């Protein structure tokens, strides 16, 4: 509601009444002598009852602490001990808001209902009513009352009717500004930066880090709330703030600074896709585009090319500004939480180290004569991810025309020759690095080839990484070939054909 010095905003839940005093008339610089008085007629009887009705205010020198006074009569109170502590809280501020782009005085009050002599709200009602008066001013300066003579006459106070319904509809635009990274909702990204989505969604990252080029998609409801402010203070620009740390703790302790990158998008204009480029201006601001304008990548706030960024923990926050580069307060229900992304652009290290026969190393492309029907080979390999984001590894054999071995009948070899995956190693820290050297099958077992042929042995490993549209997308592979000859196989002898010699005196045609 409008008050003589600005605007009063009110909202409540079951245990608190939240009051915002947006004093747009108090501009210039923050004045420590600014004050407010908030009077409450506790029993709503329209008269001042001594030692029952209340006054809430600051005291000199402390703009961020709320004090509770009892009234003795018109414009008279008991005073207060400066060490008093009450459940209600106060936070002062000075800056722009949706009501004015000019920096001005603001107070946010969180009244505990117990301080107002109101019990926790019963959803069945009736709705409690708070009859109040408010005075704002500056010590030694002017003041304004709503209603007039608010501290001397309770016969015509303002009223706030508190809501009782526990599931009242949320304010339009409620939610975070960044809705998704690609197709992964930010609600599916944990506080440590890893994403998990269960089936049957389009993609199902499992404690996955991020990689590649990432699209930051805005929440259309929140963007519309910012765009449709209809005031000079409405958002026209934004900054993408960024900080980095090798660990989550290091990122949390780092300082935010604007991140500057450029991207392109296509605006849909009738039947045409019109190419447009986007990037920051000289001050690091991006233009806030009307959320209703159709694009091929709708509501793309920021496109982050990560190839030159260090792996680790990156954090982002979006701040909005008006056309004069003054910060814009977020509309009710709109939030701009810090978004944390774990980044891992590195492929795993894979190496088919050796093929072993009888414990001896078999060179690549060699021919191995097996000694019995149960004789075979072992494979020594590496499948390792230093960052600990390994998803899976698989050791396979191929021969002939697309042939692969059948799945062995029992663990630990669920497919091919050997495989393993993150589900067997999952932990709260998400760390699974794999192996730097493993020999499979483990001695004394060997892998017995089904037929005599040339074989390609391959190790492949994949990391838990996503660009928001596909998962997984980073893998590495290595292979080696040998020929394995089973006992009893026909031996093919290559005979070198002698060149024809011309009889003496006979000339062969040229």
Image (spheres, grey):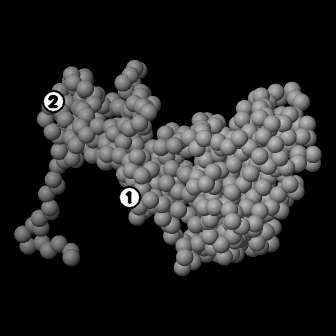
Look at the image and tell me whether residue 298 can be seen.
no
Q: Nearer the viewer, residue 192 or 488?
A: 192
Q: Residue 44 at x, y = what percent?
A: 88, 37
Q: Which residue is mark 2?
A: 358
Q: Nearer the viewer, residue 66 or 119?
A: 66
Quarter of the image with the N terminus in it? bottom right
Q: In the image, what residue occupies the spot 17% across and 40% down?
A: 362
Q: Residue 488 at x, y = what percent?
A: 23, 28
Q: In the image, what residue occupies the spot 53% across and 42% down?
A: 190
Q: Is residue 90 left or right of residue 483?
A: right
Q: Which residue is mark 1?
A: 310
Q: Nearer the viewer, residue 231 or 365?
A: 231
Q: In the image, what residue occupies the spot 36% across and 24% down?
A: 412
Question: Does label 1 or label 2 sit earlier along the sequence?
Answer: 1
- Helix, strand or loop at mark 2: loop
Task: Give the crowd class for mark 2: few <14, some 14-19, many >=20 residues within 10 Å.
Answer: few
Q: Residue furthest left?
A: 504
Q: Residue 284 at x, y = what percent?
A: 54, 73
Q: In the image, what residue occupies the spot 69% across and 65% down?
A: 140
Kindly indicate the quadrant of the structure image that contains residue 267: bottom right
């Amino acid at each position: 509601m409008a008050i003589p010095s600005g605007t009063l905003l009110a909202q409540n839940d079951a245990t608190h009444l939240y009051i915002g005093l947006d004093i747009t008339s108090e501009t210039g610089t923050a004045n420590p002598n600014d004050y407010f008085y908030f009077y409450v007629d506790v029993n709503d009887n329209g008269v001042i009852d001594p030692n029952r009705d209340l006054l809430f205010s600051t005291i000199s020198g402390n703009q961020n602490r709320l004090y509770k006074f009892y009234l003795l009569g018109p414009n008279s109170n008991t005073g207060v001990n400066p060490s008093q502590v009450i459940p209600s809280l106060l936070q002062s501020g000075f800056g722009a808001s949706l009501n004015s782009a000019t920096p001005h005085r603001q107070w946010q009050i969180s009244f505990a209902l117990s301080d107002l002599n109101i019990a926790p709200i019963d959803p069945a009602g009736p709705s409690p009513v708070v009859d109040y008066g408010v005075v704002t001013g500056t010590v030694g300066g002017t003041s304004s009352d709503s209603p007039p003579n608010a501290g001397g006459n309770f016969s015509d106070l303002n009223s706030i009717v508190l809501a009782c319904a526990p599931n009242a509809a949320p304010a339009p635009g409620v939610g975070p500004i960044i809705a998704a990274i690609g197709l992964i909702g930010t609600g599916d990204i944990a506080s440590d930066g890893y994403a998990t989505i269960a089936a049957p969604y389009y993609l199902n990252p499992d404690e996955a880090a991020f990689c590649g080029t990432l699209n930051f998609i805005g929440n259309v409801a929140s963007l519309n709330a910012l765009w449709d402010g209809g005031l000079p203070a409405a958002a026209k620009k934004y900054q993408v703030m960024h900080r980095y740390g090798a660990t989550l703790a290091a990122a949390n302790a780092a300082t935010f600074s604007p991140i500057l990158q450029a991207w392109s998008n296509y605006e849909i204009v009738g039947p045409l896709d019109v190419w447009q480029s986007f990037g920051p201006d000289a001050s690091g601001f991006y233009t806030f585009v009307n959320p209703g304008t159709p694009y091929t990548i709708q509501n793309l706030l920021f496109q982050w090319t990560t190839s030159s960024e260090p792996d680790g923990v990156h954090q982002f926050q979006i701040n909005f500004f008006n056309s004069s580069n003054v910060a814009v307060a977020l509309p009710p229900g709109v939030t701009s939480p810090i978004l944390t992304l774990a980044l891992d652009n590195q492929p795993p290290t894979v190496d088919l180290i050796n093929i072993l026969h009888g414990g001896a190393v078999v060179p690549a492309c060699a021919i191995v004569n097996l000694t019995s029907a149960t004789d075979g080979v072992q494979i020594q390999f590496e499948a390792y991810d230093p960052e600990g984001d390994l998803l899976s590894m698989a050791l396979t054999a191929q021969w002939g025309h697309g042939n692969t071995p059948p799945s062995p009948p029992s663990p630990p070899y669920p497919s091919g020759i050997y495989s393993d995956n993150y589900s067997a190693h999952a932990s709260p820290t998400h760390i699974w690095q794999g192996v730097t050297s493993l020999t499979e099958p483990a001695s004394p077992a060997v892998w017995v080839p089904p037929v005599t042929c040339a074989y390609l042995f391959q190790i492949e490993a994949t990391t838990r990484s996503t660009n928001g549209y596909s998962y997984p997308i980073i893998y590495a592979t290595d292979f080696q070939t040998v020929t394995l000859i089973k006992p009893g196989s026909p031996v093919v002898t290559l005979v070198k054909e002698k060149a024809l010699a011309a009889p003496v005196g006979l000339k062969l045609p040229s």
